Amino acid sequence: MKHVEREGVTLALTRRDGTGRPVLIVPGVMADAVGWQPVVDALDVAGPVYVLNRRGRAPSGALGPGYTLRTEIDDVVHVLDAIVAAEGAERGVDLFGWSLGGLVSLESAARRAGVVHSLTLYEPVVAPFGREVLDALRRATAAGDLDRVVEIVNRDVSGFSAEYVARLRRSDAWEVLRPLAAPLARELTALDEHPADLREVSGLTCPVTLLLGAENEDVPPYGDVFARIAEALPGARTVVMPGQGHLAHVQDPAELARHIGRALDRADRRDLDACPS
């Protein structure tokens, strides 16, 4: 399965072949399936691994009119149902989400509790997040200045240094990031306007693992938001990844894949422990 359709919008996926319980990876902003392929390549699981190209990035369709974060959640719920239909309902799906994709995955898991076998979230975000840069992002997007959008998200949201952004601008990655920046203003506006009620997800019964880069522990903008989500999920297991920040999928994909694999192994061991001997 390489794509599904929802209300006239194509949602494209990549799929690594396998046999067993499928994994679905939901990236956040400024990312697509291509950027997550190194993690997929390093992930030691037997089942198929899907990565969703969220709407707003090729080859999926546009964000569309009336776009909200609920649109994204409905997309992931639809994709989960399609994967179950394609791969076998008895297996369920191991769901992973990063950043904005983490919040989308969290709320999707709450709506498909009977489908999601385990949930792993890497530094999910929730409003308020990036609110102070929304006007600047909208102006840059309206002017077609995607270079400025990439600069804003790296400097004023993620907090990277001017030197880091200058190096990034000189690298091949800059041209990859420019088209991914096109939907960013609307995505962060949708996040800011989304009425997330973390109490609604506190009752998840599937195994939940929260991954945090050690560089962001108790450090805004990611660490403080992470603490709020961890508090709302008292049954979750928190894992701090030494030497990592918010971009382990780029900077150390093999290490991130190991942490994801360990989370899935723990979920499988819980299944075995629950079986009568």
Image (cartoon, rainbow, N blue to C red):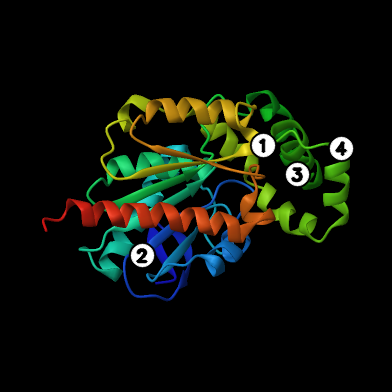
User: Which label is found at residue 22?
Assistant: 2
Q: Position of residue 7 (x, y in %)?
A: 38, 54
Q: What amino acid type should be assigned to the residue bearing mark 4? A: Ala
Q: Which residue is mark 3?
A: 150
Tell me which label, 3 or 1, sits earlier in the chain: 3
Q: Does the image show residue 28?
A: yes
Q: Which residue is mark 4?
A: 162
Q: Position of residue 195 (x, y in %)?
A: 42, 26
Tell me if mark 3 has few (under 14), some (14-19) or many (20+) residues whose alpha carbon lies within 10 angstroms of its own.
Answer: many
Q: Please tell me whether residue 126 is drawn above or below residue 74 in the rendered image.
A: above
Give the Cα separation between the discs numbered 3 and 4.
12 Å
User: Which label is found at residue 215?
Assistant: 1
Tell me if mark 2 has few (under 14), some (14-19) or many (20+) residues whose alpha carbon lies within 10 angstroms of its own.
Answer: many
Tell me which label, 1 or 4, sits earlier in the chain: 4
Q: What amino acid type should be assigned to the residue bearing mark 3? A: Val
Give the Cα separation between the discs numbered 2 and 4.
40 Å
Q: Which residue occupies the extreme front position in the image?
A: 277
In the image, 243: left or right of 64? right
